[in-house]
Amino acid sequence: GENVEQHPSTLSVQEGDSAVIKCTYSDSASNYFPWYKQELGKRPQLIIDIRSNVGEKKDQRIAVTLNKTAKHFSLHITETQPEDSAVYFCAAGTQYGNKLVFGAGTILRVKS
Amino acid sequence: KAGVTQTPRYLIKTRGQQVTLSCSPISGHRSVSWYQQTPGQGLQFLFEYFSETQRNKGNFPGRFSGRQFSNSRSEMNVSTLELGDSALYLCASSQQSSGNTIYFGEGSWLTVV
């Protein structure tokens, strides 16, 4: 069935360094790939998304890349700050409704 | 514009009871979906409604059900509660029928004792 694998499960970086989180999806019909950030006790919030007709998208310190052939997509955060510490989830969706399949999440810790 | 609103925010129920959770989507959004979040299983899709019709359903037992009203508000119900149903239940809304950004509410924290 549909599956999204996310790595690593935890990631610790020094403030100012870059962080990369990778996801792999199984459903070839997937064409929408959002990333959500969830702080402790709060709701997941969309930080960036990409659609299958685009290979890369950037928003300030955050970028997402997509390799449809390999069914990989990645989140890149540059110049990390302590407030970037949170759980990050990748997800994949298709054109059939708004259902998303989520990865297991990555706990990002930015040490100051 | 107000975000997705979920009620109640916190509740404690006893095994065997049933619970109803409510969700009001962002104004103008017609698609509502529900997710269960637990430490062990992560974010799992329950079901999605659009224009009062269930369009997608996740792999949950029949004890989990939902509905959507003509004003796009949605409810989900869990009957015969089990300890393993303790979770954060998140509602999300989207403007169009498919392939769109979904926005989450703050969730309803359910504890089953």
Image (cartoon, coloured by chain):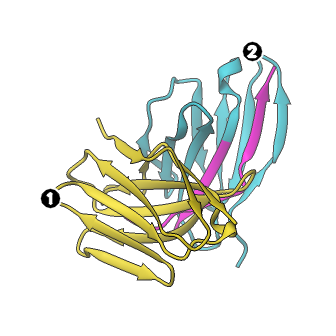
Chain colours: A yellow, B cyan
Which quarter of the image is occupied by the C terminus of chain A?
bottom right
Residue wearing tag 2? B16
Q: Is residue A55 left or right of residue B100?
A: left
Residue most extreme to the top: B16
Which quarter of the image is occupied by the N terminus of chain A?
top left
For disc 2, the chain is: B
SS for tag 1? loop
Image quarter for residue A45? bottom right
Look at 22% across and 63% down and name the residue there: A67
Neighbour tally class for label 2: few under 14, some 14-19, many 20 plus, Cα within 10 Å: some
Look at 64% across and 40% down and name the residue there: B76
Q: Is residue B111 magenta?
A: yes
Q: Is residue A80 left or right of residue A58?
A: right
Residue wearing tag 1? A69
Hey, what amino acid is under mark 2? Gly
Percent x, y of residue B57: 44, 39
Q: Which range of residues does the magenta coloring cover?
A: B89-113
For disc 1, the chain is: A
Residue most extreme to the left: A69
Image quarter for residue A75? bottom left
Percent x, y of residue B102: 52, 63
Residue A19 vertical placement versus A107 (above, below): below
SS for tag 2? loop
Residue B47 vertical placement versus B52 (above, below): above
- The answer to whether the residues at label 1 and label 2 have Cβ atoms under 8 Å apart is no
Percent x, y of residue A29: 22, 53
Hey, what amino acid is under mark 1? Thr
- Of residues B50 and B112, which is closer to you in this image? B112
Q: Is residue B62 magenta?
A: no
Look at 77% across and 16% down and name the residue there: B15
Image quarter for residue A26? top left
